[in-house]
Amino acid sequence: MTPEDLRAAVAAGILTEAQAASLTALANNRQGRRAALPAEDEPFEFFRGFSEIFISIGLVILLSGVAALLTVFGGFALLTLVPLATAGIAWWWAGYFTLRRRMTLPSMVLATAYGTGIVIFAFSLLARSGFDDRAIAIAGFSLSAAAMILWYRHFRLPFSAFLAGGAILGAVYSLTASASNLVGLVGAGGYRALFDLGESPAFATATLVFGIGAFLVGMWFDTRDPHRLGRHSATAFWCHLLAAPALVNTVAMTLLNGGGIGFLAIALALVTLLALVIDRRSFLTAAIAYIAIVIGWVMGEGGGTSWIFVLLLLGAFITAIGTWWVQLRAVVMRALPDFPGKSSLPPYGSTE
């Protein structure tokens, strides 16, 4: 909003002068914090200090003891009640470590423990219901996704969006492919057939649709925090980490089987262009890491050392893109015509 918009809101009685002044101060503060960031920075926080690592180690050891208890004793009661109790304890402790202490890494550990507990509880309970395997998988993953969405709604932890997305992907796969179909696909064409739109349209399309959905959700969060300063941007980071492999997985395998490495290179160029537009190195990193694995695997099938040179070229490409990211993005954004949402993307320029 412009200063004129704020003045008009005050004149119309929508805002008071004090509220308009507070909004102006907030906007100036966000602009200043963005300007203070390094020109090529994409903010991301995994932990804030060694104390978080220390506490996380303690939580992992404690939760590992619970897992060992399940392994040693087993039984229906423990496989349902103990995971549920573990999830409840994780929720309880997150009230302290996440809401009060604002610790990132311990919060991620607790969210993972909560999600794992819900998954084990759901599948153990549903296994006793007499449903078939597909129905159990769909219901189990759907319940887990709903539980993780509830975690995100309560604790506002960006990483929980990643866990929720993983559960949603499991539910999507459960809807589109049975175990027998997967065995047949792997036996017929291996991994390359599994994610090929021609060889496995249902499974590959499900992967592609999930990737598109995760990307759109990530962009929804991104456009609400274009200066990359708050929770929305961090949530978008995890959504893009889910979207990139899912999108590239299907597109890369389909193009690779249909046209070879050349078409895969075209796909890489398009992914790079998209990453520059949305200013997400994380999106490009996840996609390139997958493409590198695919290229190395395919080239290695034929023997020889040609795959080494392909990976060297890919490494040089990544290094060049990373080195001149800001300048390249400025060129791309200036060349693109105005489109809906362009003004909601991160600012661009020769030095950002």
Image (cartoon, helix red, strand yellow):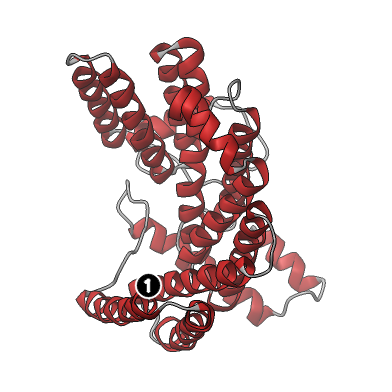
Which residue is at 46% across, 36% downward? 275
Residue 48: image quadrant is bottom left
- The quadrant the C terminus occupies is top left
Q: Is residue 131 left or right of residue 263?
A: right
Q: Is residue 72 left or right of residue 147?
A: left
The x and y percentages for residue 41 are 33, 51
Which residue is at 47% across, 78% downward? 75
The kind of secondary structure element at disc 1 is helix
**Which of the two residues, 202 or 243, is positioned nearer the viewer here?**
202
Q: Residue furthest right?
A: 12
The x and y percentages for residue 30 are 47, 64
Q: Is residue 174 left or right of residue 58?
A: right
**Which of the two residues, 107 or 341, is positioned nearer the viewer here?**
107
Residue holding disc 1: 109
- The quadrant the N terminus occupies is bottom right
Look at the image and tell me whether residue 333 can be seen.
Answer: no
Residue 297: image quadrant is top left
**Which of the two residues, 59 or 16, is positioned nearer the viewer here?**
59
Residue 101: image quadrant is bottom left
Look at the image and tell me whether residue 342 can be seen.
Answer: yes
Q: Three-letter amino acid code at disc 1?
A: Val
Give the total number of marks visible in the rendering.
1
**Which of the two residues, 169 or 230, is positioned nearer the viewer here?**
169
The x and y percentages for residue 339 are 65, 34
67 versus 99 height, above or below: above
The x and y percentages for residue 9 are 76, 69
Which residue is at 64% across, 82% downward? 18
Query: Could you classify mark 1 by the number of other residues whose Cα lies within 10 Å: few (under 14), some (14-19), or many (20 or more)?
Result: many
